[in-house]
Image (spheres, helix red, strand yellow):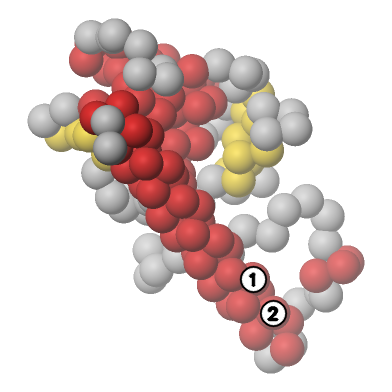
Amino acid sequence: MSPATARRIALLTNQLAEILMTAALCAEEIRTAVLAELDGGGPGLADRTGPVLVPLGSNGRHRPLLDESTMCVVWDDKAVHLGHTVAFRLLARLARRPNQYVTHLDLLEDVWDGEDRETTTIRSTVRHLQRKLRAGGMPELAAAIRGHNGRYMLEL
């Protein structure tokens, strides 16, 4: 097997693992919402408008909803239009595996499609994303994007 084929298979394996992790998280959120409805926790799911966001953990924070059809992020009943930008792809990548660090090499591969970029590009994009989220009334979400030694995560 050629090195290029091995890298491609490794990339596809990682992407599949992330998709399965996201599906498992979504299934858990749906299960929690359904159980809350069955326990008399408010209006039925069909009666609600907008996305159903279910808290994760005891801190009451939940994952942001990234709407690819409008290129918006929805958080605490607020929406910020990020557009078809690197910032949107960066947030989507971090949100796929919340509370887990992603290396700068993985970010360059997944967000910038492997283009030869400096790590300063990632820092600059993170700062731009955080400014945009703060301006849109999402300071907690902006603060949840953390970096450490060239690795980044969405801490929820």
Of residue 27 and residue 116, the one placed in the foreground of this image is 116
Does residue 36 sit above or below 96 in this rendering? below
Q: Which residue type carries mark 2? A: Val
Image location of residue 42, percent across then percent down? 76, 77
Q: Quadrant of residue 30?
A: bottom right
Image location of residue 19, percent across then percent down? 50, 52
Of residue 4 and residue 104, the one placed in the foreground of this image is 4
Mark 2 residue element:
helix
Q: Which residue type carries mark 1? A: Ile
Say which residue appears at 44% left-offset and 37% top-offset.
93
Q: Is residue 28 left or right of residue 99?
A: right
Does residue 90 sit above or below 23 in this rendering? above
Disc number placed over residue 34 in the picture, else none: 2
3D distance between C-alphas at marks 1 and 2: 6 Å
In which quadrant will I find the N terminus? top left
Image location of residue 15, percent across then percent down? 43, 45
Q: Callout 1 environment at 10 Å: few (<14), some (14 to 19), or many (20+)?
A: some
Q: Is residue 50 left or right of residue 101?
A: right
Image location of residue 53, percent across then percent down? 62, 58
Residue that badge 1 annotates? 30
Contact, mark 1 vs mark 2 (Cβ under 8 Å)? yes
